[in-house]
Image (cartoon, grey):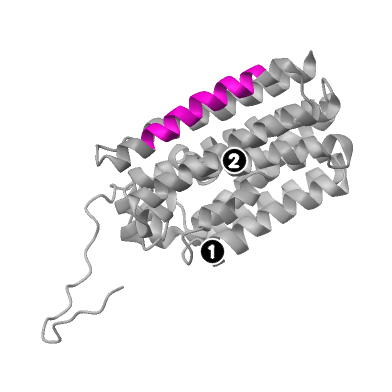
Amino acid sequence: MTAVSDQSAAPAPPSQPEHVATPAPRTFGTVVRGYVALTKPRIIELLLITTVPAMFMAAHGLPPLFTAVATLVGGTLAAGSANVLNCYIDRDIDQLMSRTSRRPLPQGLISPRSALTFGLVLGAVAALLLWFTTNPLATALSIGANLYYVLIYTLLLKRRTAQNTFWGGICGAAPVLIGWAAVTGTLSWSAWAFFAIVFFWQMPHFWALAMKFKKDYAAAGVPMLPVVAKPMRVAVEIVAYSWLMVAASIALWVVGMSWIYGLVAVALGGWFLIDAHRLFVQVSRGERIRPMRLFHLSITYLTVLSVAITVDALI
């Protein structure tokens, strides 16, 4: 924060943000929905979208049903645990952002202590379930990803560096490795290529979102790249990581997929690159920026690519 240059001016008293939502009535139903919301189900959906095709790839077809179900349930609980703990740690800044002010902790629907307990219990159950139903490698990867997300990303990096999204991308892409390891007990070049796709995907995905909610992140003191860098630099990095993502998708084709996946990967990659460059042109020309178009496209990209991987593995 910048210092006040006029020493005679009294600091303004802190005020309640205008966007703070009115707390919902505390009933059994709202509390249950609050606990579910703490796990961030929509983020978990994206994680599962990459776990499933990784298991199909690893099995060269249908993975063992028991292993698949156990991995998905354990992965859901593990991701839910990490998200709950993230909400617990970030409860102070969530109340400052319009996008997050309606979450259960800023609303006072669930107490911080209850959220912390809930997150730790979910994490413990996830670890035990994966340990007894999959194998040590999958379990270790899951525990490591959660610890990295909570301790390294959320506590150490998120509020200190504009490259927080880059470093956070490691745990965001970890479900690919967990799914693969759960089936095979090992990791291969195909697993790492798929990991690279999801890793590089996260930069254009999250930076597009951060461009839209730049004022929110600035108000909360979170140095997301669009907050601390000029729009042109953000646009350049989005284009660069989009190219790396597409290159990784081609690498996956080379190391183990058929022409079915290859055609989809090339077509999807071309579509994504066109839109990433469109955003760059909007910024360079000083036109109105529409980053949410790329954000929504990124979700479609990852979903369709994951379906293509699954179909390819089956055929």
Q: Give the main secondary structure of the magenta stretch.
A: helix
Q: Is residue 2 covered in magenta?
A: no
Q: Answer with left or right where residue 100 lies relative to residue 59.
A: left
Q: Are marks 2 and 1 in contact (CB under 8 Å)?
A: no
Which residue type does callout 1 highlight? Leu
Question: Which numbered disc flags the more N-terminal residue, 2 or 1?
Answer: 1
Give the residue number, with chain letter if any, for mark 1: 157
Instruction: Give the residue at x 78% y 35%.
Output: 190
Q: Answer with left or right where residue 53 lies relative to residue 183.
A: left
Instruction: Give the residue at x 19% y 72%.
Output: 13
Query: Residues in magenta?
Result: 263-279
- Tell me residue 130's x, y (percent): 80, 44
Separation of residues labelled 2 and 1 (CA atoms):
23 Å
Q: Is residue 291 above or below residue 62?
A: below
Is residue 270 visible in the rendered image? The answer is: yes
Looking at the rendered structure, the secondary structure element under dot 2 is helix
Is residue 99 visible in the rendered image? The answer is: no
Q: Is residue 180 above or below residue 57?
A: below
Q: Answer with left or right where residue 144 lies relative to residue 210.
A: right
* Viewport quadrant of the C terminus: top right
Residue 244: numbered disc = 2
Tell which residue pokes out farthest to the bottom in this image: 7
Instruction: Please state which of the two labelled residues, at mark 2 or mark 1, is closer to the viewer.
Output: 2
Tell which residue pokes out farthest to the left in this image: 8
Instruction: Give the residue at x 63% y 35%.
Output: 247
Instruction: Give the residue at x 76% y 29%.
Output: 254
- Tell me residue 71's x, y (percent): 76, 36
- Tell me residue 182's x, y (percent): 82, 38
Looking at the rendered structure, the secondary structure element under dot 1 is helix
